[in-house]
Amino acid sequence: MKKQVHLVISGRVQGVFFRASASFCARKLGLTGFARNLSNGDVELVAEGDEAQLKKMMAWSRQGPPGAQVDHVTAEWSEATGSYAAFSIR
């Protein structure tokens, strides 16, 4: 059964290729969804797929790409909606 995880990542996560790196990681894991910058400096990430792969994405998000400094990650789990055909950067 597919799940969805909604992450909000805070810290130094904008201007360090966080969204592009997240997109690469998500595609490698076979996940769909999106990543986008928020006006407060956080990054929002919504991903859908197998729970095990989503947990790997969450683990990656706690560190991010080189240059990022992740201070906090909030996660909300729900059932997958099937709304995403691929993983995109917004």
Image: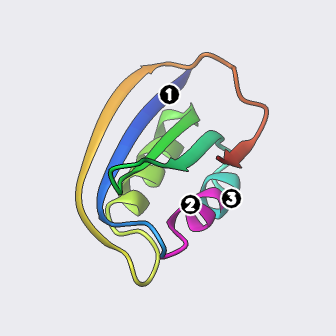
Callout 1 amino acid: Gln
Label 1 neighbour load within 10 Å: few <14, some 14-19, many 20+? many
Query: Where residue 80 sits in the image (x, y, percent)?
Result: 56, 19
Residue visible at 40% across and 48% down in the picture: 39
Query: Where residue 83 sits in the image (x, y, percent)?
Result: 69, 21
* Span colored in magenta: 16-23
Inter-mark Cα distance, 1 to 2? 18 Å
Callout 2 amino acid: Arg
Q: Which residue is mark 2?
A: 19
Q: Quadrant of residue 13?
A: bottom left
Inter-mark Cα distance, 3 to 2? 14 Å
**In this rendering, which labeled residue sits more in front, label 3 or label 2?**
2
Query: Does residue 29 belong to the magenta stretch?
Result: no
Q: Quadrant of the N terminus?
A: top right
Q: Residue furthest front?
A: 39
Against 72, is 49 above or below? above
Residues at discs 3 and 2 in contact (Cβ within 8 Å)? no
SS label for mark 3: helix
Residue visible at 43% across and 47% down in the picture: 38
Callout 3 amino acid: Lys
Q: Which residue is mark 3?
A: 28
Inter-mark Cα distance, 1 to 3? 17 Å
Query: Where residue 56 sits in the image (x, y, percent)?
Result: 45, 53
Q: Residue furthest right?
A: 85
Q: Which residue is mark 1?
A: 4
Residue 82 is left or right of residue 60, and the answer is right
Q: Residue furthest bottom?
A: 67
SS label for mark 2: helix
85 and 28: which is toward the camera? 85
Label 2 neighbour load within 10 Å: few <14, some 14-19, many 20+? many
Q: Quadrant of residue 21?
A: bottom right
